[in-house]
Image: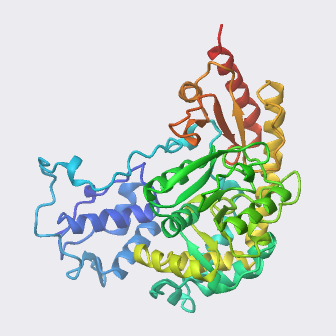
Amino acid sequence: MAIPVDTFFLDPGFDGTLQQQIQQHVTEGVLTGVLRPGERMPSSRKLAQHLGISRITVTLAYTELVANDYLVARGRSGYFVSENAPSPPEFDLAPRQRQDSVDWSRALGQRFSGFVDVIRPPDWRSYRYPFIYGQADMRLFDHQNWRQCALRALGQRDFESMTVDRYERDDPRLIEFIVRNILPRRGISARPQEILITMGAQNALWLAAQILLTQRRKAAMEYPCYPGLREILAQTRCGTVSVDVDADGLPPEALPPDIDVVFTTPSHHCPTNATMPIDRRRQLLRMAAERQFIVVEDDYEFEMSFASSPKPALKSLDEGGHVIYIGSFSKSLFPGLRLGYVVASEAFIREARALRSLILRHPPGHIQRTAAYFLSQGHYDSQVKRMGQAYHQRRGVMEQALLQHGLLGPDRATAGGSSFWLRAPRGIDTAQLALALRDRGVLIEPGHVFFGNDRPAQRHYRLAYSSIPSERIPDGIAVIADSLRQSGPN
């Protein structure tokens, strides 16, 4: 029996190639029982004419389906659904109405859904002026060389790195590059056994909090701070204290005496971008040695230092093992990579490795090996240089536009980063401002999430320039300035 050509159609919203869409149409037809073993497929010529595409596209799709045993080729007779193709399930997959009788208010032992992070719409790319933080401009990324590194990692010589279960171990090539090339740029010397690969910086912060904190211990965090860290600390049920930052970041003298762990972002404070001076860093380390507390250093965006060379990392000044250093490739490569690392004393890394193995064993081997090739072949250095030049230009354009419209205050002198931390005039709620700006094609990040619920600050907002080209920045800032004027007191 021949399968009618009208069975096939193209979905204009399909996320993939035409060849992939044909393959998916056939596999879904087999798995749902619409296409049955022994039935003859439309010829490649007829299907190509019906769909209005190239015949070679259909032929390639059929060839791939034969390789996966969904179809079989029979001489001059054409293609047929394979007798060895997966069988559709015997039970009914149709959705059924269900009355949930579980009282989840009692069944849930812990709640995590109350966390409020910076809200970014999924379709942010469709906005003309997306001043949102943490998203990459794909035009700056070296996709071709990343693809070549990924293909090399899939080669037979490296296939084991993707298929083997390393248990708690990491890719030695990636570790070696971090030891020899990444850490020396921050003045850090470390051995391989003092490094752990993580699923980004947030995963590293969670590991540190789980290992270091209990209900009887106290942690200090910057105020304002990264909202994800505040929630991570809340889940440990430890005591917390917020320390107000100033133009130089976290002031060590403001730390209370009974602190066990201090979380800080000295290179670029989140979200103000303040950079901690060397003398303050040394003071913090002296206090850590005297009081025997641990410092967790989140060294994000250290590559994006425009006004001067990056300051030495806290970890590079640490002589007593009091600093746990967290780095990430999410900002310097792309956020979806979710690859970071922790550098700390071997005793801590041993516990972190054991805890990580209980959750995810290790980050995917193929991702680790691809990153190792991309870094070791010099593509990473070129990428950072290209991004740094683009961000430096965008920062200059944004600073000029903000000054032109009177939106930049006197505390604008920060060394780098990829955003500006701003404050609106009195009487303006930036959460409401953000909603109003969406209707005008502008995305900003209101600042209240960085302060938490204890002392909400409605006037702050963050403008990032990592995901918006330079030529759009002035017009976007003009729209923000106009909205601020309209929202201000009459």
Place residue 445 in its image quadrant: top right
Residue 238 lies left or right of residue 196; in this view the side is: left
Place residue 289 in its image quadrant: bottom right
Front one among 81 and 328: 328
Q: Is residue 194 above or below residue 30?
A: below
Q: How many marks?
A: 0
Rendered-image quadrant of the N terminus = bottom left
Residue 276 lies left or right of residue 110; in this view the side is: right
Point out residue 451 in the picture as x, y percentages from the top left corner.
Answer: 58, 39
Rendered-image quadrant of the C terminus = top right
Residue 386 lies left or right of residue 271; in this view the side is: right
Point out residue 224 in the picture as x, y percentages from the top left corner.
Answer: 63, 43
Front one among 69 and 382: 382
Point out residue 217 in the picture as x, y percentages from the top left corner.
Answer: 51, 61
Front one among 237 and 59: 237
Residue 335 lies left or right of residue 469; in this view the side is: left
Front one among 17 and 76: 17
Point out residue 211 in the picture as x, y percentages from the top left corner.
Answer: 50, 70
User: What colour scheme has been applied to the protein in the rendered image?
Assistant: rainbow
Place residue 437 in its image quadrant: top right
Q: Residue furthest bottom?
A: 157
Q: Residue furthest top?
A: 490
Q: Is residue 207 above or below residue 354?
A: above
Residue at horizontal 77 percent and vertical 61 percent from the top = 303
Report whether residue 151 is seen. no
Report whether residue 40 is seen. yes
Residue at horizontal 44 percent and vertical 56 percent from the top = 237
